[in-house]
Amino acid sequence: MSAVGRLLRNENRIDFPSLWKRALTASAVLFVVAVGALAFLGLNLGIEFEGGASWEVRSAEVTSEKLQSSLEPLGLGNARIQNVGRETWRVRAETESAAALEEVKIALADAAGIDQADVTASAVGASWGDEVTAKARNALVVFFIVLFIYISLRLEWKMAVGALAAVAHDILLTVGVYALFQLEVTSATVIAFLTILGYSLYDTLVVFDKIRENERRATSATAMTYTEVTSFSLNQVLMRSVNTTVTSVLPVLAVLVVGRFVLGAVTLQEFAIALLVGLIVGTYSSLFVATPIVAWLKEREATNVERQIAATKRKHDGFDIGTALADADRSRKVRSGARGEGHRVTGAPKGVSKGPTVTVTKRRIESPAKSKSEASEREPQGEVKPRPRKKKH
């Protein structure tokens, strides 16, 4: 059976630990590229964050040079002009008054040969942009704190560390893409970033929940490591993660194609690009960033160290973790059933790989309650006199 066939049937047996080092190396390279793009290129922030004025001109005949030359008499020769969609140009500059805003609007309309009503203008103060930036930063910090507390209470703090690392990884790589290609960051982009946080967290918690379930199943199976349980769990949820990602990416691609090439809607494009990058990176991080971190932290616990020692003694070609977990489930059922019947359950002797031993213990059989008629027949009749004591000489 091919690898695709096993994946579709959820019968894959991928050795994820062998892929983690290469995946983390790839993440480190992408991390360096993203940080470099942020440091040397910076983000192309929209007017919602930097403040200023923006004009959008819809014309198929005008060029960026023509628009630039029309603004030079107004002292705005350094204005940023960007083709953001189908026959749509966006001009950004700083103006000090509403009159200057209207003058630029007239100049752009004349240069494009269109009516003034076809030129849309908007302005945002610099103080408002700073306030929005500060609130977004504070909201992100609060989100990380609440997320860490919740996962620590719901699962454990080691998984909270892995989830936070995956979310930070997704945000940084997505922001790095925007910095590298100088895509404009607007309020719609911020909304997309928040959506990415929710998706990445959801996919990671699904993986962690499956790992925790199999960890409980492997309690009585001491000859398997936590990393092996983790790899087995990832194989179980892999197809689910792929299906969720594909069904999420297809609508986003439709929004991106329709918004960018059909409708020319810039807002849809800005929103869809962030979502598309975040969905793909989020699926990757849940399998190759969050999970390796948790496995690395958990393998240093005393119980899991003992499991590693036991696993080194049982290594052989015929070992299958799925079979071992199924045997552990059966052993647990035997133990619970035996205890319910009053038997004593002991572990297997040293050096024996069998399951638990059930020792049958005798239970005292209580006689049934006697009826009142039988009890009355055995009661003494008449007056009962006490037996006289013998005198001591």
Image: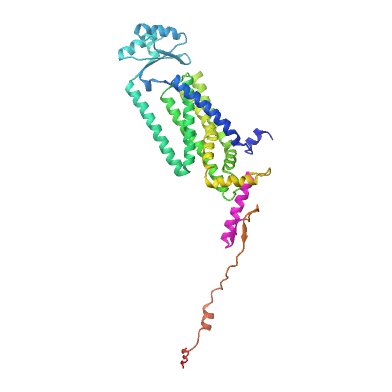
- In the displayed structure, 24 sits above or below 208; it is above
Task: Please identify the quadrant where the N terminus is shown.
Answer: top right
> Which residue lies at the image location 47% right of the left edge and 22% below the top edge?
36
> Main SS of the magenta segment?
helix
Residue 330 within the segment the image draws in magenta: yes
Q: Position of residue 378 (x, y in %)?
A: 53, 83
Q: Position of residue 71 (x, y in %)?
A: 38, 8
Toward which corner of the image does residue 139 lie, by quadrant? Answer: top left
Single out the residue that lies furthest toward the bottom.
Answer: 393
Count of labels in the image: 0
Viewer-closest of 315 and 93: 315
Decide if residue 10 is on the left or right side of residue 292.
Answer: right
- In the displayed structure, 39 sits above or below 2; it is above
Q: Position of residue 189 (x, y in %)?
A: 44, 25
Magenta residues?
321-347
**Is residue 199 among what the camera can see?**
no
**Is residue 329 among what the camera can see?**
yes
- In the displayed structure, 307 sits above or below 59; it is below
Decide if residue 95 is on the left or right side of residue 154.
Answer: left
Residue 144 within the segment the image draws in magenta: no
Q: Position of residue 7 (x, y in %)?
A: 63, 35
> Which residue lies at the image location 48% right of the left edge and 26% below the top edge?
174
